[in-house]
Amino acid sequence: MRVVVVAPYALYTPHFETDLEIVQSHLDGGDQVTIIVCQGLLRSCDVNRHHLVTQCARCIGRQRRGISVLSPHARLRVVALSSLPGWSQEIGLPARFDSVEQLRDFEYGGFDAGYAVLSSIVSMLRDPAPDLTKHQKTIQDLLRGSVRVFLAMVDYLRREEVDRVYVYNGRYGLLRPVLRSCQRVGVDCHTHERGHDISHFTTFHNTLPHDIDYVEREIQHAWRRAAGSGNREDVASEFFRRRAEGVMTSWYSFTAHQQAGLLPEGWDPDTRNVVAFTSSEDEFVAIGDQWTSGLYPDQVEGLRRIIGDGFSVGGASRFLVRVHPNLKGVDNASVRDVLALDGPMVTVIPPESTVSSYALLKAADVVLTFGSSIGIEAVFWGTPSVLAGPCFYGGLGGTYNPRSHSELIDMLKSDLAPKDPTPALMYGYYLATFGRPFRYFEPTGLFKGRFRGVELTPERWVSLVVRMNKVPLLGRLLDGGWRWWSRIRAGDSSPGNR
């Protein structure tokens, strides 16, 4: 088998180590493997927005160190993106993008390059609706790189005999074009991501990890496969209990700072309490049409309409909004707008509050979410859950899924019965078990570990570059020279970083 692993970023553990894990597994199987790397030639990327020499040095240093640990090298080839024949094709791009919609809708030869770049921008800024007029340089650099990766990979895959391609995640500006090029040419592509805990990783066949239909099928398949095990319900239940206890498995626990059992001041169990849990939208706002099919254009607009039509005057129901703890310290218009929500029966709980999300979930009469995973957790704990946005569990049958705003308001005002918890157990079982174990990578934390017994620290020359860059004038000269030299090496005569 001829395998290609596109690994432009080497800074982040465990994703680069997962690239290496995949490479080593295929080498062990006797396959021919090509690693396609960046070598510092992209003007901007998700790990080095401003193309700083120190970040490139660290990335290249880790990249070389990691590749040196692989064996045997006889069946391994390392190729730079800029050396691909299709890299230097002339491309024409719009001069600027003044709105999220304009960037999102931009395509280049059928490739959704605007969606890809928007996904990177919103993640860099932690803002689902950024003011693009302030970031034109970054947009242009990312877009030029994204289109070049797409064109170069299409050309490469048509020239070479390739059976399979791997790439991390696939949603970002310089990674999505890898998936799209494979889909264009008809080559199998596997995107990889973290598994159910730090010792596992997983792959998604010819799609993004955010593909709702794909993940829903995987959830159902996992549940059916475990039917004879006799413990799938126990595994799923333990997953939900550990979440409520703030136990870290594959990512941070966002509730670890909260006080167990703490409810908001003035909580009245004799009042009907409707609790809305917001989501952090920056990961999903720029995925694709699947994630724009909710009842509202965004959750802020949804909350405003719900409060206006259901909780704008005093009544028997109290409406509480729990802002996602992941938004602690994030300052953007979306967060500010949520915190500013107001009404006679409305309480907004800020992300840094120690009020317990799980105490709220269990004490609520009904829970409202726009796709947050706590919506399916509510189903497990026996609280009726109303879903107002797209998510991975929406089609499993555990939530109330209104088809209109008026239907949603009626649900929030009704005495809803808890639904069968089986869909929640299906979801919990999948999240507790998905992925396959690493063989060569030994994680020691969320962002730490050893590959084949080696911690991939950059080569010694990187430390010299970092020390030199700390000298103000020398640092500016190094960064400017690095950008100039990178453009020359990449054969890029278009306007560069200024």
Image (cartoon, grey):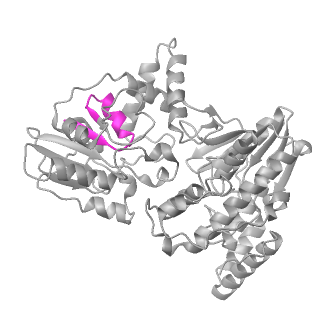
- Residue 458 belongs to magenta span: no
- Please indicate whether residue 36 sits to the left or right of residue 49 in the image: right
Up-down relation of residue 395 to residue 153 (above or below): above
Does residue 209 appear to the left or right of 417 in the view shown?
right
In the depicted view, which residue is nearer to us: 72 or 6?
A: 6
Q: How many marks?
A: 0
At x 65% / y 52%, what residue is drawn?
111
Quadrant containing the C terminus is bottom right
Image quadrant where residue 59 sits: bottom right
Left or right placement of residue 316 versus residue 116 in this view: left
x, y (%) of residue 39? 77, 63
Most foreground residue, 415 or 365:
415
x and y percentages locating residue 164 in the rendered image? 77, 38
Query: Is 213 located above or below residue 184 in the figure?
Result: above
Instruction: Point out the image quarter for the N terminus.
Output: top right
Q: Which residues are magenta?
A: 364-385
Residue placed farthest to the bottom in the image? 473
User: Image quadrant of residue 3?
Assistant: top right
Q: Is residue 193 above or below residue 348?
A: above
Identify the residue at image location x=70%, y=35%. 439
What residue appears at the point 23 percent right and 59 percent down from the top-left corner? 341
- Where's residue 482, x and y in %? 74, 76
